[in-house]
Image: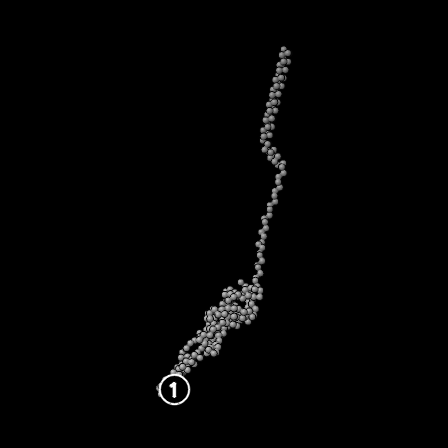
Amino acid sequence: MITLRKCGSRLAVTLAALAFAACVQGEQQSQSADSTARNLTLAPTESTAALKDVPARATEAAKPAPEKKAPVKKAAPPKPAPLMLAAGTRVPATASDSISTRSAKAGDPFTATVSQDVKDATGRVVIPAGATVSGTIAAAEPAPNPNSTGKIELSVTSVSVRGSSYSIDASVVAMDTVMKGRGVTKADAAKVAGGAVAGAIVGKLLGKNTKGAVIGGAAGAAVGAAAARASRDIDVVIPKGAAITIKLNAPLTVKPA
């Protein structure tokens, strides 16, 4: 009986030991499972923590906005100096239209065209060819007969250069003219008639008959015609395109081109 009790006690102890071992093993497995689950749960955190171990790049300082540079103004090119012609400079020109003492009178306007460039001492063109010279006719007198001379005088007042007009103090020192007879005019016819009448009177007084008067009239007419030819007016003419030379009496300044 005692032996059976001892065997029962040992068996109980063995069973208890096995049960305890099974409990311990179960608890270990549970702890292992919990540890595994915990590890799986913590993995992202650990991963993040691992990433945090790497020092983050310092935040770059904000770049200042680029300064707007004020536009650099280019220096204006220097203005060209005015163009000037000295007193005494000659300006060659040609008559724009024919001028005749037969129709022209003092005070009438005239124009001429500059025929070639007029340059200053440095070679710059002051008055270009084609510029217009304006003025007035100062005198226009035909020659009273072929043995005398008439006259035509021009007064220059301005010159137009590149669209601007400039007053000038200048004189016409030379110009091409021709003399042109007018032929027999009414005044000349009156001279012929007067000669005929005078001849007839003389013939009548001398011959005391009609025949003498006729002869005297014919002779008087011939004398009158000769007188008319000798006394007819001769016009002074400046043909269109004739050369006219102008000389400056004072300096002339014009704007540069």
Residue 243 shown left or right of residue 57 in the figure = left
What residue sits 56% from the left and 66% below the top?
A: 120
- Residue 239 appears in the picture as rendered: yes
Q: Quadrant of residue 104?
A: bottom left
> How far from the left and from the top, in percent, is residue 80?
56, 62
Circle 1: element type: helix
Residue 189 shown left or right of residue 252 in the figure = left
Q: Is residue 220 above or below residue 179?
A: below
- Residue 109 appears in the picture as rendered: no
In the image as oriented, which residue stretches furthest toward the left?
210
Identify the colour scheme used.
Answer: one colour
Q: Give amino acid for label 1.
A: Gly
Considering depth in this image, is 84 or 129 the residue closer to the camera? Answer: 129
> How far from the left and from the top, in percent, is residue 67?
59, 50
> How far from the left and from the top, in percent, is residue 184?
41, 77
Q: How many numbered marks does the figure carry?
A: 1
Considering depth in this image, is 31 or 160 the residue closer to the camera? Answer: 160
> How far from the left and from the top, in percent, is residue 58?
62, 41
What residue sits 61% from the left and 45% below the top?
A: 61
Considering depth in this image, is 88 or 34 the residue closer to the camera? Answer: 88
- In what quadrant of the picture does the N terminus appear? top right
Circle 1 packing at 10 Å, graded few (<14), some (14-19), many (20+), is many
Residue picked out by circle 1: 203
